[in-house]
Image (cartoon, rainbow, N blue to C red):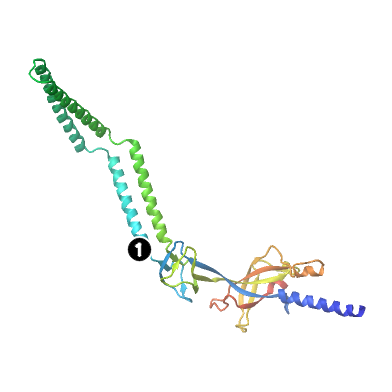
Amino acid sequence: MKKRMRIFVPALLVAGALLTWILTRGGDGADGALVASGTVEATDADLGFQAPGRVLVIRAREGDAVTAGTELARLDTRELEAGLAVAEAQLEAAQARLSELERGTRPQEVATAEAAVRQAEQRADEARRDAERAGTLFEGGAISRQALDRAQTVLDLATGALDQAREQLALLVEGPRAETIRAQRAAVAQARANVTRTEAMLANAVVTAPFDGVVTVRHREPGEAVTPGAPVLTLLDPTDRWVRIYIREDQIGLVQLGMAAEISSDTYPDRVYQGEVVFIGSEAEFTPRNVQTTEERTRLVYPVNVRVTGDPGFELKPGIPADVTLSGAGA
């Protein structure tokens, strides 16, 4: 039983060491440099509309290189364009009404109101004389009570018309109330906001490239109905690529931000690409996670991102396995 244990324990240690090397792929090169393996990754963005609708046109295909600001896709916006025309017309009408109120009453309107007052005064004077004459005739028995009442009614109507004409003239001379002007200004602001909202809806019906990149996936085709946020195109930024590697806890102190690196891959075994350390994880990961002994703590690994800086031909594509040599770590 003891002999079996002596054979089993060394074998377990060897297996554990092999597992750690496979998972971390970290080690020292011939010159003491750190060597690790990882996979090329890149920044990409799933682009979609912020508004629902039917896709009218998609101007890019997979593999197309586009520049920032280029229109890539557009929804059918005929309904939105009609709504914008209505909103602009409402704004114009509200502004015209506000201008009219702010200018106040025109002289011609005041003159017309003054003429109406004079005419009302004349009619009231005539009605007053007729009523006085009717009263004299009634007292003499020349006319009936009904005729006297009719003359008095005409006088009352003429007097009321005169009062109304005078009030209308006073309103015109005074001009619109401050409250009326404020209310119309609010109506103009509301109409302008409606125009802005409709313009924003139109802008949300267009997808533009947020950065220079390459279209990697075309998710939709013209004629399809889409919901807000549904991916239409995926755009990749070839200038922002990196290889994520994992360095053991006992070696992470040798890695520094800005450290130069060399990247190679099985795809192009005869080529070496330049890189730079741009990220070092602040928290370690356990491999395996149940760390209990001092020996097993060497299985702690830290994520490190090495940005690709020397691949203008975009040969290191996302997903390609790559080996990274941190030459400065052995110094």
Quarter of image, res 12: bottom right
Report the residue that reaches farthest toward the left: 142
**Residue 183 appears anywhere in the view:** yes
In the image, taking residue 248 as reference, residue 111 lies left or right, namely left
Instruction: Specify whether residue 211 is in view.
Output: no
Q: Position of residue 107 (x, y in %)?
A: 21, 37
Foreground: 228 or 180?
228
Q: Nearer the viewer, residue 271 or 166?
A: 166
- Amino acid carrying label 1: it is Arg
Which quadrant, please, contains the C terminus?
A: bottom right
Taking the spot 54% from the left edge, 71% from the top edge, the residue there is: 239
* Residue 45, position as x, y percentages in the image: 52, 67
Picture coordinates of residue 152, whole percent (x, y): 16, 23
Dot 1 lies on which element? helix
Q: Is residue 23 left or right of residue 111?
A: right
On the rendered structure, is 233 left or right of 161? right
x 67%, y 72%: residue: 245
Instruction: Tell me what residue is drawn at x 32 percent, y 57 percent.
Output: 85
Q: Residue 24: horizontal and vertical position, in percent?
A: 71, 73
Quarter-wise, where is residue 106 in the image?
top left
Above-or-below relation of 90 to 222: above
- For label 1, the residue is 78
Quadrant location of the N terminus in the rendered image: bottom right
In the rendered view, would you say 28 is above or below 292? below
Taking 211 as reference, is 4 above or below it?
below
Instruction: Compare residues 307 and 300 and report the one nearer the observer.
Output: 300
Residue at the extreme bottom of the image, as rendered:
270
Extreme-top residue of the structure: 140
Closer-to-camera residue (28/95)? 95
Is residue 103 rendered to the left or right of residue 150?
right
Using a 10 Å C-alpha cutoff, classify the residue at mark 1 as few (fewer than 14 neighbours), some (14 to 19) or many (20 or more). Answer: few
